[in-house]
Structures are given as C-alpha cells and as structure tokens.
Amino acid sequence: MSLQVSVEHVDGVARCEIVGEVDMATTPQLRDELLGLVDAGQQYLVLDVSGVPFLDSTGLGVLMEVHRRLRDNSGAVALVGARPALVRLLTITNLSRALPVYRSVEDASTAVTESPAAEVTG
C-alpha cells in the first residue's frame, strides 16, 4: 500500500494528513516528508493519522524523531484520529506525553502552539 501525505499550513501549524500503512516500506517517505517540514523551519506539526490503519515500530521511531527535533527547537507535534491500537501502543510505551492524541485538528493545533513540547527520555 502506498503512503500519501498532504500538508496544509494554517496559522503557523503544518497540518499533515497521512493516509496508508506506515511500515518499513513507507517510513522513509514519511520521514523525508515530516523532517523536511522541520528542516524548513516548521515548529508545529499536527498529524492526522485517521487514515493510517497500521503503524509499526519503524513508524513510531519516525514520529519520535520528529518529536525530538521539534522539542529541540521549542516546537511540538500532536496526533489526531489515532486508532485504538495506536493509542494503546503510545500508552504502553509511555510515549503518549511526547505524542499526545487529540479529538480534532483544531484542538491539536491549539495545544501545540500553546504548550511546550513534552520532555520524554528514551
């Protein structure tokens, strides 16, 4: 399955809609897309993952790399539309602080611009 990432910039926040499976085959594309935004100076990312039926450990690694890079630049990342399996994975791995999940893109956009990035080790 191919991966599609579309980006919309609204009030200083890059809202990224991700559609498709995130696995070893597609994580290089996701990494390039998201870190490309960070490298271009984007501080705030909201990732709509409602169209992601599967995310493996390599995908989780990319999300954490994005979190760390943004945190180092006083930015933040948040997720929207995470399926129960992803929410459970974030909870068990104790990464839900670094990758918080919100109900709406608007709530997530407000949260990333008003709250400092969470400090998570590991």
Image: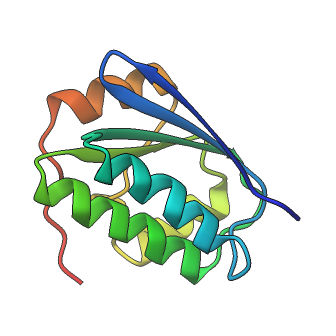
Color scheme of the displayed model: rainbow
Quadrant occupied by the C terminus? bottom left
Residue 34: x percent and y percent? 46, 54
Q: Is residue 71 above or below residue 22?
A: above
Q: Position of residue 2 (x, y in %)?
A: 83, 61
In the image, taking residue 54 as reference, residue 8 lies left or right, namely left
Quarter where residue 21 is shown: bottom right
Q: Position of residue 76 (x, y in %)?
A: 25, 46
Q: Looking at the image, which residue sits at the far right?
A: 1
Give the image quarter of residue 35.
bottom left
Q: Residue at x 66, y 69 (%)?
A: 55
**Position of 16 compared to 76: left or right?**
right
Instruction: Indicate the quadrant where residue 42 lies.
Output: top left
Q: Where 36 falls versus 46 (above or below)? A: below
Q: Quadrant of the N terminus?
A: bottom right
17 or 90, nearer to the observer: 17
Q: Where does the image place residue 8, in percent across and percent down from the top left? A: 53, 25
| Residue under the point 46% across and 71% down | 62
Q: Is residue 11 left or right of residue 113?
A: right
Q: Nearer the viewer, residue 38 or 55?
A: 38
Residue drawn at (78%, 56%) of the image:
20
